[in-house]
Image: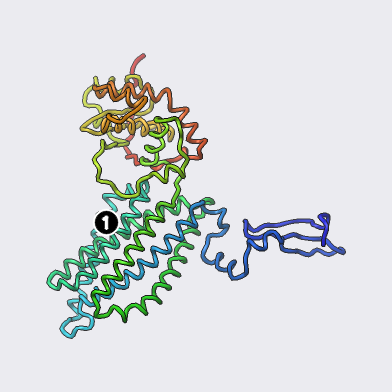
Amino acid sequence: MEDCEGVIATERYGSQESWKYLLKDGRMTKKKDEDDSRLAGNSLSGAFKSVFLPQGYPESVSQDYLQYQLWDTVQAFSSTLSGTLATQASLRGVGVGSQEATVAAATITWLLRDGTGMLGRILFAWLKGNKLDSEAKKWRLFADVLNDIAMFIEIAAPHFPPFFTLIVCIAGIFKSIVGVAGGATRAALTVHQARRNNMADISAKDGSQETLVNLAGLLVSLALIPLVTDNPSLTFILFFLFTILHLFANYKAVRSVVMETLNEARLSIVLHQYLLDGQLLSPSEANRKEPVFLSLRRTVPIKLGVRLGDIVQEPGELQLALKNNSKPYLIGIKNDAVCVCLASDASVHDEIMAACQALCLSTVLHDNSSLDGALKQLSKIKDPWELVSQSHKMFDQIFQTFLKELNHAKWQTDRTLLDWNEWRVEWKKKRS
């Protein structure tokens, strides 16, 4: 047994293993630390981690990485099996195995499906591309639900021969939307998971994990196909079972993500809790309360980064917007929406403050029957410009304390995922 004076150096590979360099009889030897040997596992486990996990795991990734990837693996496996059933149905629909089918007809059907899918991809990216960062969880779950709908349509298509081409084109559009939404939100989640600017490594290892899952799904599919061939009832039963597993795993996956950056939903949850009882929620607490489904519930919309003309239509309104306001943004209530106009010199903290103020105004305008505290006082004001003016006073008093609490709770305040448009305005300040 070596005494401590024999140790001349130690080295560690992340949290996986550590070694001691010992000096004994004039010679240097190295020995694995016995305290870490049980954590390092055997060589097979180490090789598996090296192949499928990012370098430096777990320190190089976010704390929610493992839980998310486990659920993502389950959903990918079930999606692969559902995809096999959908592919078989599509091939049967274009005439594979039928002597009456022609190669030309099948080719035209496939080209139409791919062409409509390409158009759908461009249109969706144009309409919703800027939302995929700020609401990554919602659109990630939406993409997987839409993917299941698309596969169900493909499985059902052969049962409606006269409309087969139309049905598979619709499915192609849905799948193209899935490709855009799924790929973009996966990139947003990769940015969140990367803790050492190692987004490329995380993305590459995620691809390896997905490939392994697809290979496992392929092997199971080889055993599955003979069972479902010419058996539509079993095909639908298995598809619904795989779909239930797929949706459940996806829900658990997005629920496991704990983002420290503020989007509109998380900021609203944190702010309203703070105004209610002075408690500032941690990222994990706020993420548990964040909705992950796209909502059709009617609220007073918030428009961030609008043009000056969306708020001010005449010179007198500019002076009303500047009342009690020395901040680098203007807020107005127009056309049943809360609009925020941002100055070109506004900082990230100004953006957070403007969004907080807009969220409070939206809440007051939407439902003032269940409000408490400061919001209750604001709800008594009926004139829109006076309401905005009093909200400026309110945030002059509370925002700096709120911002300090955000930093103390480990929220990121140097960047946000708030959905700001690109308009920036410079205006003449009110004369003192």
Q: Which is nearer the eye, 53 or 216?
A: 216
Helix, strand or loop status at disc 1: helix
Quadrant of residue 159 within the rendered picture: bottom left
Report crowding for label 1: few under 14, some 14 to 19, many 20 or more residues within 10 A (C-alpha).
Answer: some
Q: Position of residue 277 (x, y in %)?
A: 42, 30
Q: Quadrant of residue 316?
A: top left
Farthest residue in the left direction? 162
Q: Which residue is mark 1?
A: 122
Work out which residue is located at the far right of the displayed protein and give it. Answer: 25
Q: Is residue 139 shown to the viewer in this render?
A: yes
Q: Is residue 45 above or below residue 14?
A: below
At label 1, the amino acid type is Ile
Position of residue 263 measured from the top left corner of the image (x, y, whole percent) = 38, 42
Give the side of residue 34 with respect to residue 189, left or right.
right
Q: Quadrant of the C terminus?
A: top left
Residue 211 location, x and y as percent? 43, 69
- Say left or right for 85 vs 263: left
Q: Quadrant of the N terminus?
A: bottom right
Q: From the viewer's perspective, is residue 253 above or below residue 373?
A: below
The one nearer the camera, 184 or 67, is: 67
Please name the residue shown 32% across and 25% down the image.
376
Q: Is residue 345 visible?
A: no
Residue at the far top: name it. 432
In which quarter of the view is residue 102 placed?
Answer: bottom left
Which residue is found at the position 71% from the left and 61% from the top?
Answer: 34
Q: How is the image coloured?
A: rainbow
Percent across and percent down for residue 204 are: 47, 62
